[in-house]
Amino acid sequence: MVACSGPVIEDFSSSTQEQLVVCAGVDDTKYHNDIQQWESERDFCYAALASKTRDPRICEFIEIDYLRSDYCYMSLAKTLHDPTLCESVNRANRDLCVRDATTTILLPSAIVTDTNGNSYVVNGTSTV
């Protein structure tokens, strides 16, 4: 028996397992038997699920390299503010990935008035 690398469906919660099965079952016949298109639709399904669940292990189910590394991992690194995910990104985009995962945007100050009529200055920062 050959050991599999990467995650297997049983590694996930039951609700995520159901969604993984849906992605794996994307029907290629509605895409005019264009296998590359079918892989893209299925892989985008996996990428959307990884984003929804915030689980980078799902990126490993994606077969098309640029979708797996430069789309799935990069978007999760940015969303999760986790530059370690950039190690799975193609070398050409790694610096961009790290920058996006670690960037903080300074938001302008705002004056907030509470229900008692008291005003406060709120300084804002947000990670992208």
Image (tube, rainbow, N blue to C red):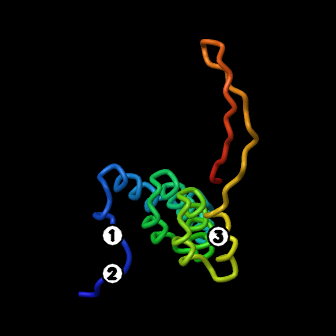
Q: Amino acid at mark 1?
A: Val
Secondary structure at badge 1 equals loop
The mark lying in front, picked from 1 and 3, is 3
Q: Residues within 10 Å of mark 1 (few under 14, many from 20)?
A: few
The residue lying toward the viewer, choosing from 77 and 24, is: 77
Q: Which residue is mark 3?
A: 97
Q: Which residue is mark 2?
A: 4
Residue 95 relative to residue 5: left or right: right
- Residue situated furthest top in the rendering: 116
The residue lying toward the viewer, choosing from 99 and 16, is: 99
Alpha-carbon distance for marks 2 and 1?
A: 8 Å
Q: Which residue is mark 1?
A: 8
Residue 112 in which image quadrant: top right
Secondary structure at badge 3 equals helix
Secondary structure at badge 2 equals loop
Q: Residue 23 at what x, y percent from top left?
A: 46, 58
Residue at 56% x, 71% y: name it.
68
Please report contact status of discs 2 and 1: CB closer than 8 Å, yes or no: yes
Q: Earlier in the sequence, mark 3 or mark 2?
A: 2
Residue at 29% x, 52% y: name it.
14
Residue at 28% x, 87% y: name it.
2
Please report contact status of discs 3 and 2: CB closer than 8 Å, yes or no: no
Q: Residue 72 at what x, y percent from top left?
A: 57, 65
Q: Residue 13 at what x, y percent from top left?
A: 31, 54
Q: Eyeballing the image, is 56 above or below 93?
A: above
